[in-house]
Image (cartoon, helix red, strand yellow):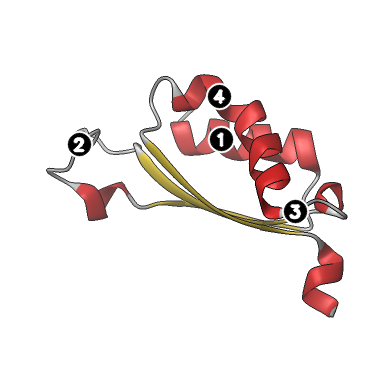
Amino acid sequence: MTVADTLKARLEDSFSPNKLEVIDESHLHLGHAGARPEGETHFRVVMTADAFSGLNRVARQRKVYGVVLDLLEGPIHALSLKIQSPDEISS
């Protein structure tokens, strides 16, 4: 299983998102700190889930980081998050 697949599976299992995009942006960081030639080090996540309703941005990020902490200590060097609740999109 790739790092991206693992990340996606964890987020799906933990948050049952309405929308989830896991984008590997490692190619944009070649030669930078934390980048590896094989990639899968820098990711962007765009996610909408009911689990984030009523939470501010920092609380949402903490929830996500709690689920993927071991990945951030290992293969993932950088994780960019855009996370919302469905009610934010409809308003």
Q: Residue under label 4, please give it.
A: 69
Q: Please report whichever mark, 1 or 3, sits nearer to the chain's N-terminal start.
A: 1
Is the residue under label 1 in contact with that under label 2 (CB below 8 Å)?
no
Is there CB contact under 8 Å for labels 4 and 1? no
Q: Is residue 87 left or right of residue 73?
A: right
- Between the residue at mark 4 and the residue at mark 1, the CA separation in whole angstroms equals 11 Å
Look at the numbered disc 3 and give the secondary structure of its residue: loop
Q: Amino acid at mark 2?
A: Ala
Helix, strand or loop for disc 1: helix
Q: Which residue is mark 2?
A: 33
Q: Amino acid at mark 4?
A: Leu
Q: Nearer the viewer, mark 2 or mark 1?
A: 2
Q: Which circle's residue, 4 or 1, is located before the other in the chain?
A: 1
Q: Amino acid at mark 3?
A: Asn
Residue lying at the far bottom of the rendered structure: 91
Mark on residue 56? 3
**Considering the numbered disc 4 on the image, is that residue within a helix, a strand or a loop?**
helix
- Horizontal side of 84 relative to 29 (left or right) equals right
Cα separation between marks 2 and 4: 19 Å
Q: Which percent across, then down, holds residue 18?
A: 79, 58
Marked residue nearer the N-terminal end (3 or 4): 3
Is residue 55 rendered to the left or right of residue 25? Answer: right
Taking the spot 81% from the left edge, 51% from the top edge, the residue there is 55
Q: CA distance from mark 3 to mark 2?
A: 30 Å
Q: Position of residue 86 (x, y in %)?
A: 83, 65
The amino acid at mark 1 is Leu
Can you identify the residue that label 1 sits on?
Answer: 7
The nearer-to-camera label among 3 and 4 is 3
Q: Position of residue 32 (x, y in %)?
A: 17, 43
